[in-house]
Image (tube, rainbow, N blue to C red):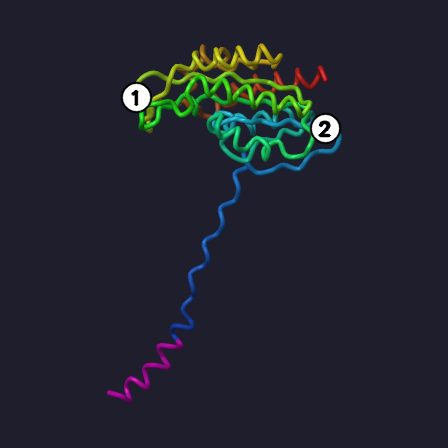
Amino acid sequence: MKLALLFLLPLALTLQAQTPKPEAKAKRAPSPVTAPIQDVAGLPRVLIIGDSISMGYTLPTRKLLEGKANVHRIPQNGGPTKNGIANIEKWLGTGKWDVIHFNWGIHDLKFMPDGKRQVEAADYEKNLRNLVARMKQTGATLIWASTTPIPEGELNPSRRFGIVKEYNDIAARVMAENDVITDDLNAHMTPEFDRLHNPKDLHYGKEGYDFLSKKVAEEIARALAKR
């Protein structure tokens, strides 16, 4: 028995050495939406700030403004205004911005397990005022995008939201008092919403994001022309 074990041990070690080790799990490549871009010298710099809706229209907007502007975006989902307060310095960085196109709202409207909205109306207004004041310090032309519609009824995944108009009205007041341009994406999308939004969802497919991007690119181009 001992002789057999002495014979089998080297064989087992040889087989173990020859067995290929599993390859290290490859790192996921950054999304082209959130990946940084290289500026084209001489073109104005644009920053898009917003949630997953803005992530959907970032690439087609960048395509529409190719050769006219360097269109950047924050490297994540912007979430609610309290996330903006926590990250605005990092998002603005140290470079010069000519136009900042921004939105917060859907995440603020969301009801949490405690029955309260993630950011209640008074705090939403306070946060917006602070964010606008900080962005104005950059010298960029600011463009506020109104929050797009949310479908009624059951959503998948299951979520509940407050009334979009309530928060859009708050934002409209803040922007008017600060002379901030409004890109009314809510009014732009509402007539086509039932056709373009995903079933039981507030997000869109390619056609919906292309539809939004045309309006976004148009507003950015208009703002750049006036600088």
Q: Label 1 is placed on what type of residue?
A: Glu
Badge 1: how crowded within 10 Å, few (<14), some, or many (20+)? few
Which element is circle 2 on? Answer: loop
Instruction: Estimate the spatial distance between the alpha carbons at disc 2 and disc 1, rounded to whole Å.
Output: 45 Å
The amino acid sitting under disc 2 is: Leu
Query: Is 85 included in the stretch rendered in magenta?
Result: no
User: Which residue is nearer to you in this view: 212 or 48?
Assistant: 48
* Residue 5 within the segment the image draws in magenta: yes
Question: In the rendered image, which residue does mark 2 sit on?
Answer: 43
- Furthest-left residue in view? 1
* Quadrant of the rendering where the N terminus is positioned: bottom left
Q: Which residues are magenta?
A: 1-14
The C terminus: image quadrant? top right
Q: Residue at x 56, y 29 (%)?
A: 59
Q: Residue at x 49, y 49 (%)?
A: 27
* Secondary structure of residue under mark 1: loop
Residue sitting at x 31%, y 27% = 114
Can you tell which quarter of the image residue 95 is in?
A: top right
Marking on residue 112: none
Q: Which residue is mark 1?
A: 154
In this rendering, the answer to whether 70 lies above or below 128 is below
Percent position of residue 62, x then y: 60, 28
